[in-house]
Image (tube, rainbow, N blue to C red):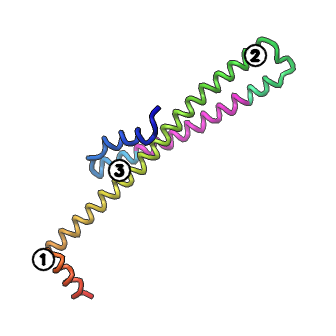
Amino acid sequence: MTTPTILADKIINKLKDSGDYELNRNKTKFDKRKKDTELVLGKLEEEVRNLRADAYVLDEEEDTDSPEIQEALSKAKHQIKEKKVEIEATRLEKDTIKLVLSKLDKMIDENNSKKNTDLMLKYLKSSGITTVEQLKAALAKSI
């Protein structure tokens, strides 16, 4: 079974060379997927609770030895197992999306930081400051 980290890394590797627009677009897309996944997870968990409640009611029947009730109980147990598998898959997807979103945030911050650094360097060069000594002198002069 794959872990959320491996799945998230595969997605992030595809986005490594993307620009700001593409990163922000993907962040929005994964935010929406996260909300949708949480809704699906809630519905699945509610279905499991309802199936368990129904199975409990069947189990409390007076005639639990009847074939109809035994069949209904086994059917309910089977449905609960199926729903649990779906819940686990949905949780894996949710965890993966969380990791992707955190890595996308980090990538966006790094891009913004790099842009700001580049803008500062351009400003310093346009001001005639090209060495660290010139920068120190300009800073000492302004203080």
Identity of the residue drawn at 59% across and 25% down? 82
Which portion, as a residue range, is magenta? 29-52
Residue lying farthest to the front in this orientation: 1
**Quarter assignment of residue 133:** bottom left
Which residue in the structure is indicated by mark 2? Answer: 70
Left or right: 29, with 111 as reference point = right
3 vs 2, front mark: 2
Q: Which mark is residue 140?
A: none
- Which of 41/131 is in front? 131
Q: Amino acid at mark 1?
A: Gly
Q: Distance of mark 2 from mark 1, alpha carbons?
A: 87 Å
Residue 55 percent coordinates (x, y): 74, 25
- Which of 118/8 is in front? 8
Q: Amino acid at mark 3?
A: Asn
Identity of the residue drawn at 52% across and 33% down? 89
Identity of the residue drawn at 74% across and 27% down? 54
Residue lying farthest to the right in this orientation: 62
First in sequence: mark 3 vs mark 2? 3
Left or right: 27, with 124 as reference point = right
Residue 69 is a magenta residue: no
Where 18 falls versus 140 (above or below)? Answer: above
Residue 85 percent coordinates (x, y): 56, 29
Which residue in the structure is indicated by mark 1? Answer: 128
- Which of 37/10 is in front? 10
